[in-house]
Image (cartoon, rainbow, N blue to C red):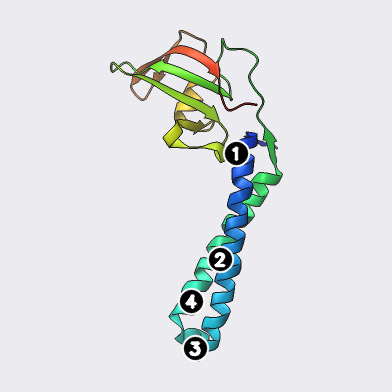
Amino acid sequence: MIKMLVTKIGLIKAKRRLQRLTAEYRDTKKESAEMFEEGNTWHDNPMWDDAERRAKILASEIEMLRRAINECRLVTRPTTHYQVSVGHRVDFFDGRGRTSSVIILGPLDVDLGDHIISYDSPVAMALLGQALGTDVPFQGGIMTIENITSWEGFE
């Protein structure tokens, strides 16, 4: 099995999210128990139904996140900058007159506001393994790789 890649920062964020989800699940189950006591029977209590539905969704998210945390592997700083790999910041010309940048990390690290994308996203999959200066076909256009550097978030 291939382990999910994540940075130390992404792992810390994932663990914090797991704590928040666990607390929310606990609160939801407590709320559900209180609502059950207020209703006559389970089929006459839509608020209880909603709380139970929320608890099931939270339980599923918690399980998926726990599995991801337990099965991940830390991303290390790339040692070369001539070929795009996970952990790189890639600056590219998009063929429409704009230069864009993305940072390729793991799924637990994604932050679109900071241009951090997952290695399994379409853009990253097109860029991974490509060399500096390469024209990369993507969605009917061309991305020209202008610069490859390590992500600044590595310690």
Q: Nearer the viewer, residue 122 or 110?
A: 110
Question: What residue lies at 48% left-to-right and 19% top-to-bottom?
Answer: 90
| Residue indicated by mark 2 | 56
Do the CB atoms of the residues marked 4 and 1 lie less than 8 Å apart? Answer: no
Give the mark nearer the N terminus: 1 vs 2: 1
Q: In which quadrant is the N terminus drawn?
A: top right
Q: Residue furthest front?
A: 155
Q: How dense is the environment of label 3, judged by Cα within 10 Å: few (below 14), some, or many (20 and up)?
A: some
**Residue 49 marker:** 4
What is the CA distance from the residue labelled 3 to the residue labelled 2? 20 Å
Q: Could you say where residue 149 lies in the image, as x and y percent from the top left?
A: 54, 16
The secondary element bearing badge 2 is classed as helix
Look at 55% across and 67% down and name the residue there: 55
**What residue does disc 1 label?**
10
Q: Nearer the viewer, mark 1 or mark 2?
A: 1
Determine the residue positioned at 58% across, 65% down: 25
Question: In which quarter of the view is residue 112 placed?
Answer: top left
Measure how far apart labels 3 and 1 are at the Cα level. 42 Å
* Distance of label 4 from label 3 (alpha carbons): 11 Å
Tell me the kind of residue under disc 3.
Gly
- Disc nearer the start of the sequence (2/4): 4
Residue 127 showing in the rendered view: yes
Q: Within 10 Å of the Cα at label 1, are there few (<14), some (14-19), or many (20+) other Cα atoms?
A: many
The reply, left or right, for residue 47 in relation to residue 119 is left
The residue to which callout 3 is attached is 39
* In front: label 3 or label 2: 3
Q: Earlier in the sequence, mark 4 or mark 3?
A: 3
The amino acid type of the residue labelled 2 equals Lys
Q: Tell me the element at label 3.
A: loop
